[in-house]
């Protein structure tokens, strides 16, 4: 069930970018309206994920898995049949709500599905998530060429219901009672949301995501443009973006397989990755030429990849299982603000100067990441 949900949520981050051109043609809308739908997906995450956290903890994980899976299937089916912009926009909002719900609960369930330590589990789980994101453009593109948008989304809608079906065979009370790694707060105590707000580490975790999210988003959004500006052909630039994601996933896999080496020192590990990310982005900002550009994009995959899953491991280790859903929700609620707003600032600056110059904002975000991870490590 967890693998199916991870593949599904990975598909979610790549789907809108994959289908935006045929969807725009069908709806007869311009890029501004397409951008509006994609922005709606991002902004809807901020309120929905924290809300899903409460439901995960207080109502139950099975409810969230099944509701998120079914709602995603419905939203994809509705989007496949949409012939007007308002219906498509509503479909994207439903899709975002479903995706957010699944992301919350599946981060909580991953350590239970992949025993062997939280850092191992979160990094391995995010490799599976990355496979979903990587395969979606390739598979969807093939189906789109052969059958069209409606059939492609119909197939995906059927696949989206798979976690709900598999959830029927999971003994969630046993899974909830399964003790994970040792927590710094007594596992049996459900002190509530006030515990999270009053915990300094919670705020540090959230601001790690606040400053890290824009780094990943900036590379995903502007790597091909940056490479093209440095003399790389568009075809090769697209291939190099795929290479970035492959290296990104491999870095997470290596971290999972070597998790025992960093056990107890995860915060120091993330601090080192933050320093490496700052260095990579500085070379990107100052460097010139195709060789430098290619090297920077590949190096970014190594330094970026393990940050988020290792952060998630630290979060889950710090709080008792009774608070995991709300802790994940608050992490995304605060961190998502930086993840959405800082890339918007980069885009606005890039229009006035260049994409390479706009990465100065990403460097500032990386420096913020260094400061927060240093405090967390201390």
Image (tube, rainbow, N blue to C red):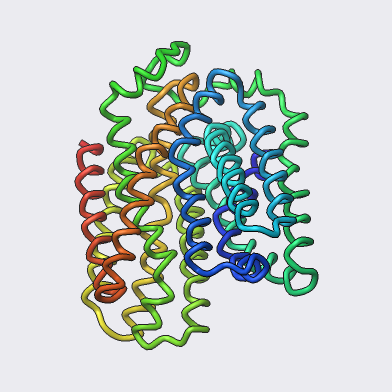
Along the viewing direction, whichever of 244 and 332 lies nearer the viewer: 332
Q: Considering depth in this image, is 356 or 109 the residue closer to the camera?
A: 356
From what the image shows, is residue 153 above or below residue 239?
A: above
x, y (%) of residue 171? 71, 23
Q: How many marks?
A: 0
Q: Is residue 177 left or right of residue 374?
A: right
Q: Quadrant of residue 360?
A: bottom left
Q: Position of residue 292 (x, y in %)?
A: 31, 80
Of 7 and 55, nearer the camera is 55
Residue 165, placed above or below residue 291: above
| In this rendering, position of residue 9 left or right of residue 237 | right
Image position of 54 with respect to 355: above or below: above
Q: Residue at x 32, y 23 (%)?
A: 197
Q: Residue at x 57, y 59 (%)?
A: 14
Q: Position of residue 307 (x, y in %)?
A: 38, 49
Q: Position of residue 2 (x, y in %)?
A: 64, 39
Q: Quadrant of the C terminus?
A: top left
Quadrant (top left/top right/bottom left/bottom right) for the N terminus: top right
In this picture, residue 24 sits left or right of residue 253: right
Q: Quadrant of residue 113?
A: top right
Vertical arrangement, residue 96 with respect to residue 224, above or below: above
């Amino acid at each position: 069930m967890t693998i199916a949900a991870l593949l599904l949520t990975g598909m979610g981050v790549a789907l809108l970018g994959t289908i935006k051109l045929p969807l725009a043609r069908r709806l007869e809308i311009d890029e501004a309206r397409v951008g509006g739908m994609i922005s709606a997906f991002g902004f809807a995450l901020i309120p929905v994920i924290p809300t899903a956290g409460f439901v995960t903890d207080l109502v139950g994980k099975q409810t969230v898995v099944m509701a998120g899976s079914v709602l995603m299937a419905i939203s994809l089916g509705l989007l496949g049949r949409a012939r007007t912009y308002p219906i498509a926009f509503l479909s994207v909002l439903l899709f975002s709500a479903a995706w957010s719900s699944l992301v919350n609960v599946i981060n909580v369930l991953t350590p239970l599905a992949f025993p062997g330590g939280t850092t191992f589990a979160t990094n391995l789980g995010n490799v599976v998530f990355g496979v979903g994101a990587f395969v979606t453009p390739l598979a969807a593109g093939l189906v789109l060429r052969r059958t069209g948008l409606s059939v492609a989304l119909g197939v995906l809608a059927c696949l989206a219901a798979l976690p709900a079906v598999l959830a029927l065979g999971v003994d969630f009370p046993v899974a909830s009672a399964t003790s994970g790694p040792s927590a710094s707060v007594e596992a049996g105590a459900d002190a509530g949301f006030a515990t999270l707000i009053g915990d300094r580490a919670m705020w540090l975790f959230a601001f790690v995501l606040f400053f890290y999210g824009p780094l990943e988003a900036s590379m995903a959004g502007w790597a091909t443009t940056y490479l093209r500006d440095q003399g790389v052909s568009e075809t090769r630039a697209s291939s190099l973006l795929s290479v970035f994601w492959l290296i990104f996933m491999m870095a997470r896999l290596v971290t999972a397989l070597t998790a025992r080496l960093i056990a107890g020192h995860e915060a120091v590990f993330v601090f080192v990755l933050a320093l490496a990310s700052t260095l990579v982005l500085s070379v990107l900002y100052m460097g010139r030429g195709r060789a430098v550009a290619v090297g920077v994009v590949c190096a970014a995959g190594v330094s970026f990849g393990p940050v988020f899953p290792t952060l998630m491991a630290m979060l889950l280790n710090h709080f008792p299982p009774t608070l995991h859903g709300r802790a994940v929700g608050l992490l995304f609620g605060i961190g998502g603000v930086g993840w959405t707003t800082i890339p918007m600032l980069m885009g606005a600056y890039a229009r006035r100067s260049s994409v390479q110059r706009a990465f100065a904002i990403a460097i500032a975000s990386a420096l913020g990441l260094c400061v927060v991870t240093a405090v967390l490590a201390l």
